[in-house]
Image (spheres, rainbow, N blue to C red):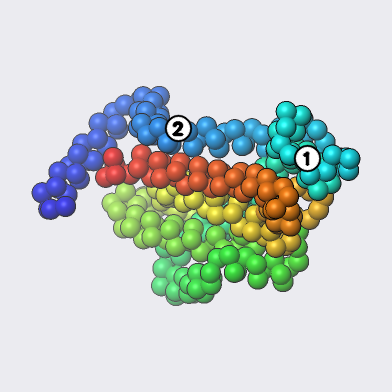
């Protein structure tokens, strides 16, 4: 891309931003939704995500059967009209267990991302705003966490704390903190020297007010985009921990644990591993596609 093309792109982005500045909030929201769903894959991915979220919320009331009830006389039955995804090695309905497993996956994902976002955003905001020695200390600590492969770090933390859903969420959150810290810091460093921030200082605004009112809102769009991707990573990490037996403990259904249990029956009942594996894939891929769509919509240059 040559310089003239870059200049034209920047000019179009600025003109579009100025135009949207005079629009009402409802009109800006309508344009945002229209741009977001211009890509059909983004609309499909959002529909899949909303379906899984609905199932996760209402799973205890909409499952066809009790996901914990064992009927040994029908163990390892192939998919049929009565049991769409078949039954597992204890005769439990696979549809019901997949639906209940979505509750665990999304709960762990949202809580872990929420913790990582909260801690990382505060560290990044403080680090980027005050700078100097405080910035150096915080960023070196974040570099240490980033030096470890994220899944290996998750497994290490859970091994230290012990298996369980709470420890799994904390372990996943620890690996997400440095990502949010570095992202927020980069935005804060670029924003804090702008004229409106200097004007706030001149008018006597406190450091806390300047950070929360004038600087923090500029990080929201970046945080939302990163969170959609990290939610997929968190769900994938939860499935990995469940596969290793370090996540949610039986009899609570977990997609990763179901894949792990099903591997012993691959020749007899391959659907025991395939179905929960497809559920993980659908959620993670949908989150990544939706995150890409948000990035393209929120970034004027990408538009």
Residue 3, x across and y down, in percent: 12, 53
Residue 287, x across and y down, in percent: 50, 44
Q: How far separated are the C-alphas under marks 2 and 1?
A: 35 Å
Direction from residue 239 to residue 129 in the image, left or right: left
Q: Secondary structure at mark 1?
A: loop
Front-most of 244 and 200?
244
As drawn, the residue found furthest toward the left would be 4
Q: Residue at x 62, y 36 (%)?
A: 53
Residue 240, x across and y down, in percent: 64, 59
Direction from residue 60 to residue 284 in the image, left or right: left
Q: Residue at x 32, y 49 (%)?
A: 196
Q: Residue at x 54, y 61 (%)?
A: 177
Q: Which residue is mark 2?
A: 43
Direction from residue 166 to residue 5 in the image, left or right: left
Front-most of 171 and 123?
171
Cβ–Cβ under 8 Å for marks 2 and 1: no
Q: Residues within 10 Å of mark 2 (few under 14, many from 20)?
A: some
Q: Residues within 10 Å of mark 1 (few under 14, many from 20)?
A: some
Residue 114 shows up from this direction: no
Front-most of 297 and 117?
297
Direction from residue 255 to residue 40 in the image, left or right: left
Q: Quadrant of residue 30?
A: top left
Choose the circle earlier in sequence order: 2 or 1: 2
Residue 125, x across and y down, in percent: 46, 58
Give the number of the disc on residue 77.
1
Q: Quadrant of the C terminus?
A: top left
């Amino acid at each position: 891309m040559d310089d003239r093309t870059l200049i034209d792109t920047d000019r179009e982005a600025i003109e579009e931003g100025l135009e949207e500045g005079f629009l009402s909030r409802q009109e800006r929201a309508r344009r945002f939704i229209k741009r977001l769903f211009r890509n059909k894959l983004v609309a499909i991915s959002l529909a899949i995500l909303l379906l899984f979220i609905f199932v996760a919320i209402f799973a205890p009331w909409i499952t066809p059967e009790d996901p914990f009830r064992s009927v040994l006389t029908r163990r390892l039955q192939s998919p049929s009209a009565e049991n769409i995804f078949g039954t597992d090695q204890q005769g439990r309905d696979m549809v019901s267990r997949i639906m209940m497993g979505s509750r665990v996956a999304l709960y762990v994902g949202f809580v872990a991302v929420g913790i990582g976002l909260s801690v990382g955003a505060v560290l990044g905001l403080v680090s980027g705003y005050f700078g100097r020695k405080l910035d150096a200390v915080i960023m070196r600590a974040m570099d240490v966490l980033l030096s470890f492969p994220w899944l290996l770090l998750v497994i290490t933390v859970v091994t230290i704390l012990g298996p369980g859903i709470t420890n799994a969420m904390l372990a996943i959150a620890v690996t997400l903190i440095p990502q949010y810290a570095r992202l927020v810091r980069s935005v804060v460093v670029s924003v804090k020297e702008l004229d409106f921030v200097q004007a706030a200082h001149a008018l006597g605004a406190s450091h806390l007010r300047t950070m929360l009112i004038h600087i923090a809102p500029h990080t929201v769009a970046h945080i939302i985009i990163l969170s959609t991707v990290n939610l997929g990573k968190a769900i994938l990490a939860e499935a990995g921990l469940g596969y290793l037996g370090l996540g949610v403990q039986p009899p609570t259904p977990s997609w990763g644990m179901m894949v792990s249990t099903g591997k012993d029956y691959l020749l007899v009942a391959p659907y025991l591993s395939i179905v929960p594996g497809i559920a993980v894939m659908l959620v993670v891929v949908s989150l990544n596609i939706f995150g890409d769509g948000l990035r393209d919509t929120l970034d004027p240059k990408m538009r």
